[in-house]
């Protein structure tokens, strides 16, 4: 936003010789010399703001620049407020995870997915457990099967170092 404000030229910062001028009410005043347009804006107690610097000739608008900056700031704040941050939650399993612990972890994943977050299921292998990669794969496939009603697998189980990962994302709700 800072960069956009710096690019917007106002009053004496406008370098073009001739400009196309739009009045405060939106009507076209036509092409005129920059000094004449500046004089017209000052008579009305407003600013001459360059809104389209790349056109030929540049388009300038007669307006209250302070009010314009304020409205731009409010617009960006509103856009930021409406955007939502999707987080990636991570749940760790082990090849020897017992049934009750498994159910608890699946319940957590279900809650994260229902909240709209992505979830990464990770199997962590310690020591000689690394030999039993098949057990980790079975657990991850079971997690995907248990949650297929609310989530889909975005990233299939893959092995990285001593971990096996799988990414789950919420299903798109059809309205």
Image (tube, rainbow, N blue to C red):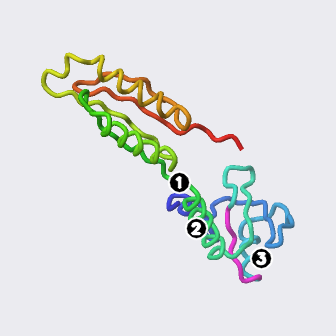
Identify the residue under disc 3: 40
Q: CA distance from mark 1 to mark 3?
A: 44 Å
Identify the residue under disc 1: 84
Crowd tier of the residue under label 3, counting other residues whose Cα lies within 10 Å: few below 14, some 14–19, many 20 or above = some
* Residue contact at pointers 2 and 3, CB within 8 angstroms: no
Within the magenta stretch, is there residue 151?
Answer: no
* Front residue (pair 113, 59): 113
Q: Residue 85, image x and y in percent?
A: 48, 52
Please report the residue visible at 44 percent of the width from the left and 27 percent of the height from the top: 155
Sequence-first tag of 2 and 3: 3
Quarter where residue 88 is shown: top left
Sequence-first tag of 1 and 3: 3
Q: CA distance from mark 1 to mark 2?
A: 19 Å
Say what secondary structure mark 3 lies in.
Answer: helix
136 relative position to 115: left or right: left
105 relative position to 44: left or right: left
* Front residue (pair 62, 163): 163
Q: Residue 137, image x and y in percent?
A: 34, 21
Say what secondary structure mark 1 lies in.
Answer: loop
Looking at the image, is 85 positioned above or below residue 107? below
* Front residue (pair 46, 96): 96
Q: CA distance from mark 2 to mark 3?
A: 27 Å
Looking at the image, is 47 positioned above or below residue 22? below
Identify the residue under disc 2: 73
Quarter where residue 14 is shown: bottom right
Quarter where residue 52 is shown: bottom right
Say what secondary structure mark 2 lies in.
Answer: helix
172 relative position to 161: left or right: right
What stretch of residues is rendered in magenta? 44-50
């Amino acid at each position: 936003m800072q960069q956009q404000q710096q690019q917007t030229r106002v009053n004496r910062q406008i370098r073009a010789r001739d400009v196309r001028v739009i009045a405060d009410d939106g009507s076209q005043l036509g092409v005129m010399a920059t000094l004449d347009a500046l004089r017209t804006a000052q008579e009305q107690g407003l600013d001459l703001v360059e809104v389209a610097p790349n056109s030929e000739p540049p388009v300038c608008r007669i307006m209250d620049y302070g009010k314009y900056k304020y409205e731009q700031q409010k617009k960006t704040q509103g856009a930021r407020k409406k955007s939502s941050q999707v987080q990636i939650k991570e749940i760790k399993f082990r090849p020897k995870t017992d049934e009750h612990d498994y159910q608890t972890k699946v319940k957590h994943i279900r809650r994260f997915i229902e909240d709209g977050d992505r979830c990464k299921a990770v199997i962590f292998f310690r020591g000689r457990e690394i030999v039993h990669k098949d057990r980790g794969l079975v657990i991850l496939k079971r997690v995907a099967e248990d949650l297929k009603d609310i989530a889909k697998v975005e990233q299939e189980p893959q092995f990285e170092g001593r971990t096996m990962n799988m990414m789950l994302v919420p299903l798109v709700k059809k309205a």
